[in-house]
Amino acid sequence: MEKATFAAGCFWGVEANFRRIKGVIATAVGYTGGNFEDPTYEDVCTGRTGHAEAVDILFDPALVSYEQLLEVFWNIHDPTTLNRQGPDIGNQYRSAIFYHSQDQKTTATVSRERAQTSGKFKRPIVTEIVPSSTFYRAEEYHQQYFEKGGIGGCMIH
C-alpha cells in the first residue's frame, strides 16, 4: 500500500471523488501543511493556521497508480485559482500535492507540467508540490460526508 495526499478545495468533494476509484483502499479528510498543532475545523476556517483541507489516500499501486490519482486530481478542481475553489475562498482551499517520497515529487512535477501544456487550462497552474507534513484527521462528521447524507456548499465534480 502507498499513501497520497491532495488538497483541491473543500475536502468533502475531493474525498468523494477519490473514494470511487478502484484501488483506493481508504481515505481520510483532514488538515495539513500548516503551522498550528492539532487544529480544529474552526481553527482552519480562520485561514490563520496555514493548513489546507486535504485528503489522505491509502491506495494499492497494483490496482491504481499514483499517476492515475494525479489525473483525477487535475480533473476535479481548477488548479489555476489561488486559494479558491468555486465559492470557497482562503488558503485552506489551495491546490496542493503533498508528496511522500522523491518518486512522488518527480511524478507530480512531471504531471503538473503535462497538465499545464495540455491546453486544458488557460491560466498558469498554481498548485503547490510540497513535502508531506503532519496530517491532522478532521472531526468525524467530516469523514465520508456525502456518504452520510451531508449536503453543503462545496463544489463536487
Image: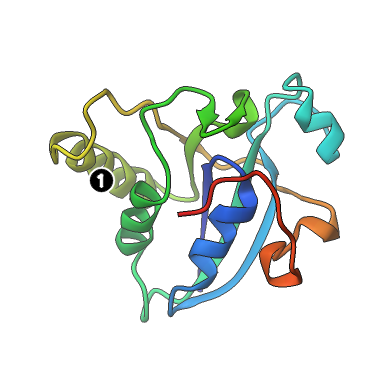
Q: Nearer the viewer, residue 139 or 109?
A: 139
Quickly name the residue at label 1.
111
**Relative to 17, does residue 51 appear above or below in the rendering?**
above
Q: Is residue 105 above or below residue 123?
A: below
Which residue is depicted at the point 83% across and 34% down?
37
Q: Is residue 86 visible?
A: yes
Q: Residue at x 72, y 62 (%)?
A: 145
Quadrant including the C terminus: bottom left
Q: Nearer the viewer, residue 60 or 48?
A: 48
For the view shown, which residue lies furthest in the top direction? 48
Residue 143 lies left or right of residue 63; in this view the side is right
Asked whether the viewer can see residue 39, the reply is no
Where, by quadrant of the figure, is residue 26 drawn?
Answer: bottom right
- The reply, left or right, for residue 67 in relation to residue 3 is left
Q: For the residue labelled by badge 1, is the local secondary structure a helix, a strand or a loop?
A: helix
In terms of depth relative to the viewer, which is nearer, 100 or 113?
113
Q: In this view, does 6 lie to the left or right of 37?
A: left
Residue type marked 1: Ser
Q: Compared to 130, does 68 lie above or below? A: below
Q: Where is residue 137 in the image (x, y as percent from the top left)?
A: 76, 53
Residue 2 in picture, x, y percent from top left? 49, 67
